[in-house]
Amino acid sequence: MTSGDLKLRQAEKTDADQIFALAREFALTFRPERQAFDDAFPQLLDNEDALLLVATVEGTVRGYLLGFTHLTLFANGRVAWVEEAMIESAYRRHGIGRMLLEEFETWARSRDAGYVALATRRAAEFYGALGFEVSATYYRKLLTVTK
């Protein structure tokens, strides 16, 4: 793969099938359901506080990053949070993840975010090489969704 084959851009509605396939590979705890994905996808594309980036190789989506900025009280303004970052397994270690994160950081800076954070149990060396440091313990509590 050459860098000429790789392109980053904001996701478009036509990327839904390819992003859904990657989301299914990403998820360990949850199993993405297509209807929930189809409900959320257009809302994310329209959300000015969200950025959904795709990395394409020869026109095919091989990775994506979903992140947000939001206001805080403790950090004196906005912070940025990477919710999902997924690269198709055959395309890892080609710089795609680095490029997605750098593009997200540029966007976060343009929105005056004080920092970028994420939670993960994977790829500690990768994130460390990009200047991320361990900052906190991550807790979660699963909620029962009532419909």
Image (tube, helix red, strand yellow):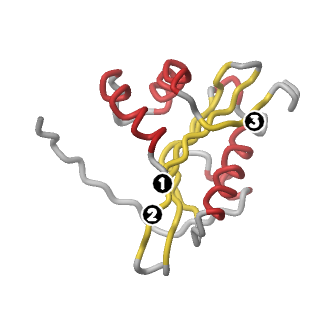
Task: Say whether disc 1 or disc 3 marks the residue closer to the N-terminus.
Answer: 1
Residue labelled with disc 1:
49
Looking at the rendering, which quadrant does residue 129 occupy?
bottom right
Q: Estimate how packed mark 3 is, as few (under 14), some (14 to 19) or many (20 or more) residues with alpha carbons within 10 Å.
A: few
- The label on residue 70 is 2
Q: What is the CA distance from the residue labelled 3 to the residue labelled 2?
A: 30 Å
Residue labelled with disc 3:
93
Residue that protrudes farthest toward the left in the picture: 146
Closer to us: 127 or 96: 96
Is residue 142 placed above or below 32 in the rendered structure?
below
User: Residue 91, position in %: x, y?
Assistant: 71, 27
Evaluate if marks 2 and 1 touch, with contact meaning CB atoms under 8 Å apart.
Answer: yes
Q: Is residue 11 left or right of residue 140?
A: right
Q: What is the CA distance from the residue labelled 1 to the residue labelled 3?
A: 29 Å
Element marked by disc 1: loop
Q: What is the CA distance from the residue labelled 2 to the residue labelled 1?
A: 7 Å
Q: Estimate how packed mark 2 is, as few (under 14), some (14 to 19) or many (20 or more) residues with alpha carbons within 10 Å.
A: few
Residue 31 can be seen, yes or no: no
The mark lying in front, picked from 3 and 2, is: 2
User: Residue 111, position in %: x, y?
Assistant: 59, 64
